Amino acid sequence: MKLTSSFASLIVCAVTLASAHDAHLEARRTSSLLISPPGLPKLPTASAATAAAATVGLNLTDIQGDIVTGMTKNRETFLFFGIADAPSFKSKLRSGVLPLITTAMQMTKNSTQPTTLVNVAFSHTGLGALNVSDTLGDGAFTGGQLADAGNLGDPGTSHWVSQFVGTNIHGVFLLASDTDANVASTVTAVTTALGDSITQIYTLQAAARPGAEQGHEHFGFLDGISNPAIQGFDDSPLPGQASVPPGEIIVGETGDPFISQRPPWAIGGSFLAFRQLEQLVPEFNKFLTDNPIRAPGFTDQQGSDLLGARMVGRWKSGAPVFLSPLADDPALGADPTRNNNFTYALNGSSTSSSTDQSRCPFSAHIRKTRPRADLGLPENTGRHILRGGIPYGPEVSDSEAASNTTSTERGLAFVSYQSSIGNGFQFLQRFWADNTGFVEQNTGFDPIIGANKGANRTVGGLDPTDPSRTITLITDFVVSRGGEYFFSPSLSALANTFTV
Ligand code: N7H
């Protein structure tokens, strides 16, 4: 009799566990939590991702989902926290939050996506707080972003959000969904589960822009078109999309240049560079209005639009200036099979001209940050990042537009994933965007993100009627408000290393 009753309670226990497990995995969604503006690449299907993963042995159920999701978040909250009580944090993270962490695999199908994507990443000081003492083999991560401000071209930290000045931030939760209510209830679930084991240091709420601007960043340009396809996750890159070995983004995988320096538990993780980048939109628009390109037959408006497009390298629709040099082509911008299909070289050549900027300036933001044939083809720079950012802040108000002056902060909550911050985000900012001699002499700064510690920035090649003309920018239209470097561990590392 006794045996039978224990057996019965075992069954009850097993059923309860199974239903809790099923509740976690059960189909809760019929529509995606992501946006899908025309022109942006889509995530691979679950079966395509599974087949791709098998070829390189990538464990997509162990990799956090945000790493592969790209710039298609709809509503997202970044919750930066300190660990107040490490033992309590570990046990609460394990019991209350770990079951909510979303995997890469889950993101590939609406029915397996959660109500709200939940991901977590830790700073170097966060690893210390948790007694995770292994060296991860990334100097920028170890030093933290504050120590890197000068390298990135920031004019000190006087513009930084005060909470980023210091090394108190131990980690960040990223919570994304299709409604504010979903995000808010999941924020409550996570913070309630963790209770006093954390201190909430800083929160940034971000959202895709409304209506027809959905998918466009605050200057008005479609963003998130060009992200690399990670081999082993997406083996069907779109035309012109970079296909990168998994180790360029995911630590410890094939192609990770520092693979020998990684502790085993770091495999399947990725370094997350977070930057809060304010955008001075009315000031940017005023600059375009005041400095139209004076091309024959162009109205002032057309000249201003051309200047903006050449600064970015794409028109607002996403159409690349290299393929459509004089006017926007919205059909091209909206077509993901064509809008990334260019190399800056002509006629199938593997190198681009070192003098011809008629189609696209060397300084254009997308050319600085991915020079394609400028560094020769096939493209194997090892400098790709997976961008996962989202706009924050309100639309420009009438009074801001009328006064050409920002009064309420807005910008980009910039997120990039890479297996090496020094090869990825830091390199792109420091050695490409801020380097006036890259990719050719007199290229000047990247006019969008290039930073000169607050001093004026010279930019070459913007005027196609006189490519030798240098334009001096006296305003930084993108202002760093600081950030932090994090490591986004695999789910097994969270279970076996971070919570024990
Ligand atoms: Fe950039 N922008 O609106 O001008 N970015 N970016 N970015 N960005 C891109 O091709 C923008 C920033 C890259 O593969 C587009 O997806 C703004 C940082 C890279 O051809 C637009 C900010 C870094 C690419 C913008 C900002 C990068 C890229 C075109 C800050 C790295 C892909 C859409 C407020 C250090 C290049 C697209 C490629 C594209 C804008 C930040 C890097 C419109 C406003 C900090 C690698």
Image (spheres, rainbow, N blue to C red):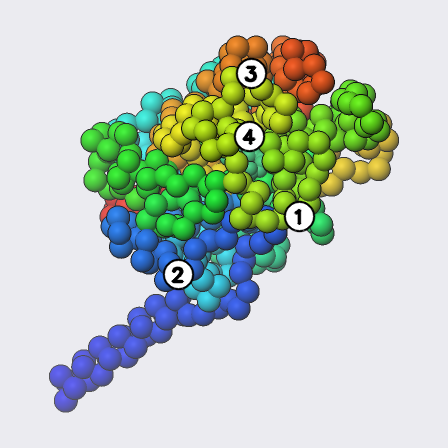
Structural distance between the alpha carbons of marks 1 and 4? 20 Å
Q: Tell me if the residue at label 1 has its CB under 8 Å from ligand 1.
A: no
- Tell me the crowding category of disc 1: few under 14, some 14 to 19, or many 20 or more residues within 10 angstroms, Cα based: some
In terms of sequence position, does the residue under pointer 1 or pointer 3 come before the other? 1
Mark 2 or mark 3, which has the lower sequence index?
A: 2
Q: Return the residue nearer the eye: 384 or 394.
A: 384
The residue positioned 28% from the left and 79% from the top of the image is 12
Point out the image quarter for the N terminus.
bottom left
Place of residue 88 in the rendered image (x, y in percent of width and height, measured from the top left): 34, 46
Helix, strand or loop at mark 3: loop
Name the N-terminal-most of marks 1 and 4. 1
Is the residue marked by circle 2 packed among few (<14), some (14-19), or many (20+) residues within 10 Å?
some
Cα–Cα span, label 4 and label 2: 30 Å
Q: In terms of sequence position, does the residue under pointer 4 or pointer 2 come before the other?
A: 2
Disc 4: residue Cβ within 8 A of ligand 1's nearest atom:
yes
Q: Label 4, on which residue?
A: 366
Say which mark, if any, is on residue 355. Answer: 3
Residue 390: percent from the left, percent from the top?
A: 58, 42
Of the residues shown, which amino acid type is indicated by label 1? Ala
**What residue type is disc 4 on?**
Ile
| Total residue callouts | 4
Comes first in the chain, label 2 or label 1: 2
**Is residue 220 in sight in this rendering?**
no
Q: Is residue 404 above or below residue 437?
A: below
> Is 305 in front, or is 151?
305
Q: Which residue lies at the image location 71% right of the left edge and 25% below the top edge? A: 307
What's the amino acid at mark 3?
Thr
Residue that carries the numbered disc 2 in the rendered image: 46
Residue depth check, mark 1 versus mark 3: number of the one nearer the observer? 3
